[in-house]
Image: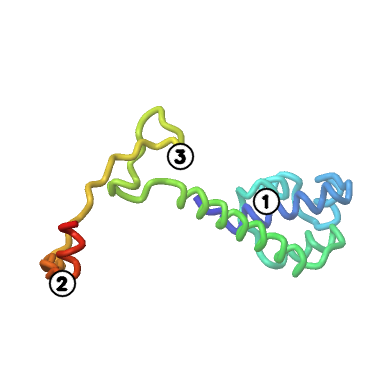
Amino acid sequence: MAVLMREAIGGSLRRARTARRRTLRDVSRRARVSLGYLSEVERGRKELSSELLAAICEALDIALHDLLTEAAEAMAADALAADAVRLRRPIGLRHMDLRIAGVSDDPSTLPVAPVAPVSPRHPVPQPSPQPVALRAADAVCAAA
């Protein structure tokens, strides 16, 4: 499942706060936000208004656009990771997507069935062998 914006922003806020070695209590006092609410925001459980987000960023001495950029990058990284996981799973029931129990994903270890040669739809005409006429000199050499 994709990361929600509130989770990405909360994670970015927590990283910024801990990088600056600030406590929840200190930031909540400076931003005039309750300690419990700030904790819920950092855990991605509560949505916050743009006014509260700006106040928290000011209390942390970080630019709002820097925080939002970091949150957007976290969401993009999560989306890429989710796509990578999705692409590794079999898509359908085509013969190439089936997995055999106990066999590794290494293509060199997968069993391969022999493939019979396919005959062309229209046979290619082959030249028929033509008899070779002997010359008189060849006949004399052959008799000798």
Which residue of the protein is positioned furthest toward the front in this rendering? 144
* Kind of residue at badge 2: Arg
- Label 1: which residue? 41
Residue 135, numbered label: 2
Q: Nearer the viewer, mark 3 or mark 2?
A: 2
The C terminus is located in which quarter? Answer: bottom left
Q: Nearer the viewer, residue 83 or 141?
A: 141
Residue lying furthest top: 102
SS for dot 3 = helix
- Mark yes or no: residue 122 visible: no
Distance (Cα) linking label 3 and label 2: 61 Å
Report the amino acid beneath label 1.
Val
Q: Position of residue 85 (x, y in %)?
A: 50, 48
Do the numbered discs 1 and 3 sit on residues whose CB atoms are within 8 Å? Answer: no
Quickly name the residue at label 3.
108
Q: Earlier in the sequence, mark 2 or mark 1?
A: 1
The amino acid type of the residue labelled 3 equals Ser
Q: Measured from the top left, where is residue 138 in percent x and y?
A: 19, 66
Residue 14, numbered label: none
